[in-house]
Amino acid sequence: MHDTIARMIRTSVGVLRGGTSGEYELSIKSGAAIMNALPEEKYEMRDILIDRNGLWHLRGTPATPARALSQVDVVLNALHGGVGEDGTVQRILDRVGVPYAGSRALGAGLSLNKIRARAVLDRAKILIPRGIAFSLNNNMNTSDMAKVVFSTIGPPYVVKPPAEGSSQGIRIANTVIELPDALGDTLDQYGSALVEEYLIGAHATVAVLEHFRQEPLYVFPPAHIDLPKRVLYFDPRSETVSGRHIVPSRFPQDIKMQIAEIARRAHEALHLAHYSDADFVVTRRGPVLLEVNALPGLHDRSAIPHMLEVVGSSLREFLEHLIHLARK
């Protein structure tokens, strides 16, 4: 009798995972982490898969978004990149009228597009790497593009697609001679490319959570990403190359405070909601913001579970707080 009543009053949680980006497998893992963290006596989990073509599935069967979301009380979005972060899924959720955790369409799409995000962050006077963007519409070949970059920024260079996360598609050009090929490959695959200066320093990441522990924007202790030798950037998709998240980090207190302040300002400048995380390189000039993620990973290779542990919290508390924010 009591078990039946408890099931009747459980909150129905739709977990979106999969998606159209190169982060499909990471999203599957984040979704699994969410479903494993929430107790089934309080929550009825609905596993909603969006496949690589953008088609929705409920319990393995193709379904319209409206059908997949019917009788769902709240949605936790475990999608990374693609339709999950460019605003597409957020607009669908708004149209259906289901409360959901995470940023709205504007903030998600803005943070995912690195070129647009750079413009916003620059206007907010947040220190970001020097960079130049190109597209197939530019009336120049890749050699000319490389000359433009070289006239402003010295090597080495980071060449990245403008709307991918988790180090997806990143190329390193150690010299200007390598730059045309890196640009050509990125333009061919993604249609546009962002070239940034390669920054020397320690890599860090930090998460922001709204209205947590009586703070409007609570910033967790930053994690130092300890990279293996000769690895230039952290790729959480790689099964062979891993970076350790060291929390608490050994950064000086003033650096930690700077990272926290920049993360707060970036969260607000990009119109993000509920939570986000920000990636940094700590240089001799201080922390430089690389990018902000509207839907950070929650899988076992991501930093947030480590940050939660070090402040005496848990993924369950984090998710229940997100559900509260979404329904509020």
Image (cartoon, rainbow, N blue to C red):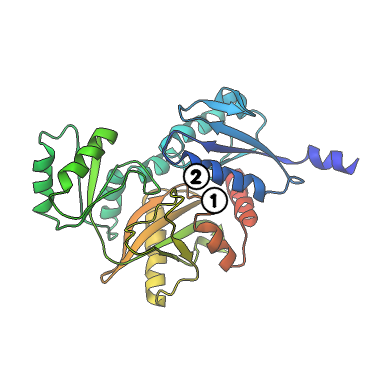
Residue plotted at (56% across, 37% down)? 16
Report the Cα–Cα distance between label 1 and label 2.
7 Å
Are there few (<14), some (14-19), or many (20+) residues within 10 Å of tag 2? many
Residue 128 is left or right of residue 228, and the answer is: left
Counting from the top left corner in percent of width and height, residue 198 is at 24, 58
Residue 292 location in percent, x, y?
39, 52
Image location (x, y in percent) of residue 146: 12, 46
Q: For numbered disc 1, what is the local secondary structure?
A: loop
Disc assigned to residue 26: 2
| Left or right side of 212 for 238 | left
The three-letter code of the residue at mark 2 reads Leu
* Residue at (11% x, 52% y) in the render: 150
The answer to whether mark 1 and mark 2 are in CB contact below 8 A is yes
Secondary structure category for the residue under label 2 = helix
The residue under label 1 is which amino acid type?
His
Name the one closer to the observer, 42 or 184.
Answer: 184
In the displayed structure, 252 sits above or below 100; it is: below
Residue wearing tag 1: 299
| Image-based side of 262 in relation to 36, left or right | left
Query: Which residue is farthest right?
Result: 1
Q: Residue at x 61, y 55 (%)?
A: 315
- 1 or 2: tag closer to the N-terminus: 2
The reply to whether residue 276 is visible in this rendering is: yes
Q: Residues within 10 Å of mark 1 (few under 14, many from 20)?
A: many
**239 vs 152, nearest the viewer:** 239
- Report if residue 328 is visible in the image: no
Which quadrant holds the N terminus? top right
Q: Position of residue 266 (x, y in %)?
A: 37, 56
In which quadrant of the rendered view does residue 308 lie? Answer: bottom right
Q: Is residue 53 above or below residue 250?
A: above
